[in-house]
Amino acid sequence: MIYEFADTLKTIELADIDESRLCAGMVSLEDLKENGGEGIFFGLSCFEECKKPESRFRSVIEVADGHMFSVLSVRNVASVYGARDRIGMYIRKNLFLLVSIQDADGSTTRAFEDAMRRLNLKTVSIERVVCAFFEQLVYQDSGALESYENKVGKLEEQIEHETTGKSFNAEILSMRRKLLIVRHYYEQMLDIFETMIENDADLFLDENIGLFRMLRDKIERLSNNTQLLRDSLVQVREAYMAALDYSANRIMKVFTVVTTVFLPLTLIVGWYGMNFDFMPELGWRFGYLGVIVLCVAVAILSIVIFKKKNLL
């Protein structure tokens, strides 16, 4: 789908692009090849880069000969392990052309079309077209990051209420891996915007560069929030380990108290278990009862002392 911006937004074919007029479009690799676009719009190296499989987080950025080219991996922040989209982005003075390399659910295509229809035709420019597309890519990300914040809060509540399960630590590590992918996603966008702000190919008007700075700052805030969430998960894990240590210490405290209470009783049992002929209690009528009373008294005295020392 190729759009030409004039008094109205009209649809044109790839072969009808006039670089004297502002145009924006999204095409597939097959459409580009059929219409000879790999030689007209894209350099052969750019076209070959689009055909390479995704193998890295960082975006490919090329600035030369009055154009800018980049390959961007688009992530759904709410579901980072879901379908991944990949697009090639080609920019000239009056041309913003996207190549859909991978778009299984059509989300990137919908984002592009929604962005184009939201533009004000009276003030449209190549800078506004680019910003409108990226705005559409990230406009739901704040809500997605907020859902991650809620999940972190629930993990903290589990620690507070002692309802953590066996998979608690695995949940933390899984969420940190997801947030790492999200952070890399924002970093590749920041690389693209830094390149556009530098404007080495002189593609953009100086008075419109501020639009890129504003959107870059927004993406940077999203990236910083993502890193804060990763740091929060480290703190949650430390709190979880501290809770485990406290629970283990509490159990050891109980065992220690029980052992200490029974230690004098063990001494008494060992003492009266010796086979001596002249033990006065053996011939005493109330000897057995006396030992029982002594043991009970020792146990009660030990418990009272522990309570006074706040050990129980």
Image: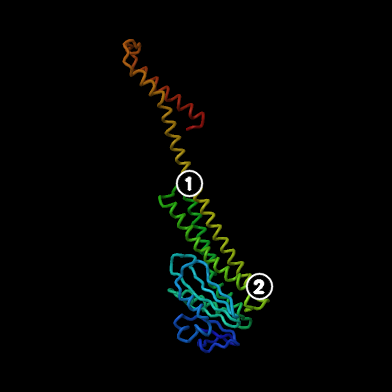
Return the mark for residue 210.
Answer: 2
Q: Nearer the viewer, residue 60 or 275?
A: 60
Up-down relation of residue 198 to residue 172 (above or below) = below
Q: Amino acid at mark 2?
A: Gly
In this view, the residue farthest toward the front is: 45
Callout 1 secondary element:
helix
Dot 2 alpha-carbon crowd within 10 angstroms: few under 14, some 14 to 19, many 20 or more? few
| Residue 204: x %, y % from top left | 63, 78
Callout 2 secondary element:
helix
Mark 1 → mark 2, Cα distance in angstroms: 47 Å
Q: Nearer the viewer, residue 17 or 239?
A: 17
Return the mark for residue 173.
Answer: none
Q: Horizontal placement of 269 versus 308: left or right?
A: left
Q: Amino acid at mark 1?
A: Met
How many numbered badges does the structure rendering display?
2
| Residue 53: x %, y % from top left | 44, 71
Residues at marks 1 and 2 touching, judged by CB atoms closer than 8 Å: no
Up-down relation of residue 273 to residue 174 (above or below) = above
Dot 1 alpha-carbon crowd within 10 angstroms: few under 14, some 14 to 19, many 20 or more? some
Return the mark for residue 241.
Answer: 1
| Residue 208: x %, y % from top left | 65, 76
Up-down relation of residue 123 to residue 299 (above or below) = below
Occupied quadrant, residue 126:
bottom right
Residue drawn 50% across the image and 84% down it: 37
Residue drawn 64% across the image and 78% down it: 202
Residue drawn 44% across the image and 36% down it: 252
Q: How is the image coloured?
A: rainbow
Up-down relation of residue 82 to residue 149 (above or below) = below
| Residue 281: x %, y % from top left | 35, 13
Q: Nearer the viewer, residue 49 or 100?
A: 49
